[in-house]
Image: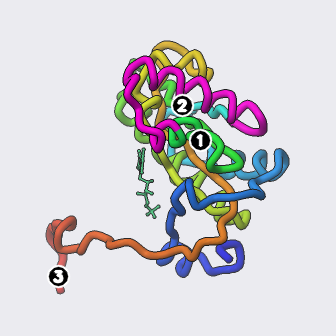
Amino acid sequence: MYEQIKLLDYLATRRSVPAFQMCEPGPSKSELEDILKLAVRVPDHGKLAPWRFIVYRGARRAEIGEALLSMALVKRPDLSEEMIAVERARFTRAPVVIGVISTASAHAKVPEWEQVMSAGAVCLNLLMAANAHGYVANWLSEWFAFDEEAFPLLGIQPGERVAGFIHMGSTTFPITERPRPALDDVVTWVGGDE
Ligand SMILES: Cc1cc2nc3c(=O)[nH]c(=O)nc-3n(C[C@H](O)[C@H](O)[C@H](O)COP(=O)(O)O)c2cc1C
């Protein structure tokens, strides 16, 4: 499992697992505290900590799913049975969901863009910290990350934005690789020699 391997091997094989392939157990509260302590160790211009966490656990996850389903049905009363089940299960696929909330705002010295990117770094760090504790994880957003009508339900304040909902748990599925970009497609070399 991930917690036993060398950093280089980890980075070369790290993968997310789809939330619907997750199961119990998820991290305990004390493991989550350890995971969150690791996650906040990110580059953060100005030491503003322009992000915060909302940890969704236990029975409340099912209540949130029911409420999201009600909201989805108001927008799309013709939702298929399959999508009704999907909406209902949004927060119960994984044992733990952590909302990474960007609190970025205008600042005299630190561009808001940099504050937002720091929240993205927190999300990746959360995936890695979960893996280091033996759990699988996935960084999702989904429609309610962009629908401010859902924010009160999720505990998100006006003006805040969702960097991601990080799902964590265990899995019985094999973790498969996915295609990665070819370096030639994404790298421009400037200067240097062979
Ligand atoms: C900001 C962000 C939001 C994402 N939201 C979703 C989503 O809502 N639904 C989805 O299926 N995948 C979403 N993904 C992609 C998943 O994280 C996907 O499983 C991931 O790209 C797998 O990559 P990895 O195996 O390298 O971790 C999102 C990724 C990012 C970076």
Look at mark 1 in the image and give the residue it sits on: 89
Q: What residue lies at 66% left-to-right and 71% top-to-bottom?
A: 172
Residue 41: give x, y in percent of width and height: 61, 48
Does 66 appear above or below 118?
Answer: above
Residue 107: give x, y in percent of width and height: 41, 20
Which amino acid type corresponds to the residue marked 2 in the rendered image?
Ile
Residue span colored magenta: 56-84
What SS does tag 3 mark? loop
Taking depth in this image into account, of 64 and 47 the one nearest to the observer is: 64
How far, Cα to Cα, is label 3 from label 1? 53 Å
Q: What residue lies at 54% left-to-right and 41% top-to-bottom?
A: 85
Look at mark 3 in the image and give the residue it sits on: 193
| Side of 149 where 33 appears, left or right | right
Residue 183: give x, y in percent of width and height: 24, 73
Label ID, residue 172: none
Which amino acid type corresponds to the residue marked 1 in the rendered image?
Ala
Q: Quick check: marks 2 and 1 in contact, CB under 8 Å?
A: no
Tell me if residue 118 can be seen: no
Look at mark 2 in the image and give the residue it sits on: 101
| Badge nearest the viewer, 2 or 1 | 1
Q: What residue lies at 47% left-to-right and 44% top-to-bottom?
A: 82
What SS does tag 2 mark? strand
Within-10-Å neighbours for mark 3: few <14, some 14–19, many 20+: few
Q: Quadrant location of the C terminus?
A: bottom left
Residue 140: give x, y in percent of width and height: 48, 46
